[in-house]
Image: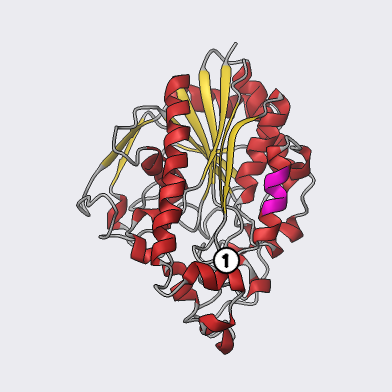
Amino acid sequence: MGEILGLGVTHHPGFLGQDENLAELLRRTLKSDRVPAHLRDSKNWPEPMQQEWGSDEGLASAASHRAHLMADFAKVRDRLDAFKPDFVVIWGDDQYEQFREDCVPPFNVFIFDKYECQPYLQSSSINPGKSNIWGDPIEKVFKFQGHMAGAGYLVQNLIESDFDMAYSYKVRDGSPLPHSFLNTIQYLDYDRRGFNHPIVPFHVNCYGSTVIRSRGSLGHLFGGVENRFDPISPTPRRCFQIGQATARILRDSPWRVAIIASSSWSHAFLTEKNNWIYPDVEADLRCFEDLKAGRYTKFRDMNLKDIEEAGQQEVLNWVCLAGAMHELDSKPEFIDFVGSWIFNSSKVMATFAPVS
């Protein structure tokens, strides 16, 4: 019988760079013609947003936001190391990095023995390129261990449980593993102690109807958006079910496994009702209270339309985790909500009681 540890983190790209760049997504969004002119003046923002912006354009807030989150990451990493997993499953999303017009699977497990990449060479809106908080050279090679046996076992058993799973033995040529997975590892290794836990990346198509037309980022705010239909992401119910099935499969395996949901919650650049400049903090707080209280089925019963209106697409990664924790009847040991109006998203960090 296996043993499972549940964890939840953010992979917010801003923490890769310096504090002065943490609000870069907001600055870029304000240049869009789709943002009303009056909202380009901070005096017209909601009061909490103005306070966070301050007189230094959020620099002091950035330092405290980073310090808070990285202290939480240290707690999660300590819990992970103490658990000593055989491998780590990470639920993360793709933003037009691996899956594009040729194929967009609802779910995909990456099966590899080892993996290496140079992510800083692929500078983009979700990757700061040359600028990084550690002073790493742009050509730095990152190497990670996979767990082919565990990944293959998980996929095989999900298929036998009637989930039509996709899987990959390699990444798209010239592109690194999606940032949702890479950043998770980077931040869990923020103090550069080394990260030796084998990983099994588990992709969830969180962005659904926006991933192609928005190119997984700010495409809907710049360059004209095609008036087109694109299919939705997997439903919250299906994400919850796949989380339950993952927990059952790994509980019956011979391994100790940590399962991680990696994402921020409501994203400003996805929240049209707020003119794309600040996230739906209230919606996030409601979800957080449900998670904190162990009301996991609330995540199963979320409405996808409401999720999209709140800019909470990436919460689907946490819906998978909620399904797993519901299946295992595991309650939070540590949980923290770190809200923000100017740093694009609310963040939640959590550890759950291990279950065998």
The x and y percentages for residue 293 are 73, 37
Q: Residues within 10 Å of mark 1 (few under 14, many from 20)?
A: many
Magenta stretch, residue numbers: 285-289
Instruction: Pick the residue in front: 16 or 231.
Output: 16
Using the image, determine if residue 280 lies above or below residue 106. Answer: below
Residue 111 seen in the figure:
no
Using the image, determine if residue 346 lies above or below residue 325. Answer: below
Q: Residue at x 66, y 31 (%)?
A: 324
Q: Is residue 288 magenta?
A: yes
Residue 97 seen in the figure:
yes
Q: Residue at x 61, y 37 (%)?
A: 165
Q: Which residue is mark 1?
A: 268
Task: Please identify the quarter of the rendering in which residue 24 is found.
Answer: bottom left
Q: Is residue 54 magenta?
A: no
Magenta stretch secondary structure, dominant? helix
Task: Please identify the quarter of the rendering in which residue 170 is found.
Answer: top left
Instruction: Pick the residue in front: 202 or 167.
Output: 202
Q: Residue at x 41, y 47 (%)?
A: 183
The x and y percentages for residue 161 are 70, 27
The x and y percentages for residue 144 are 34, 34
Looking at the rendered structure, the kind of residue marked 1 is Ala
Q: Is residue 88 left or right of residue 352?
A: left
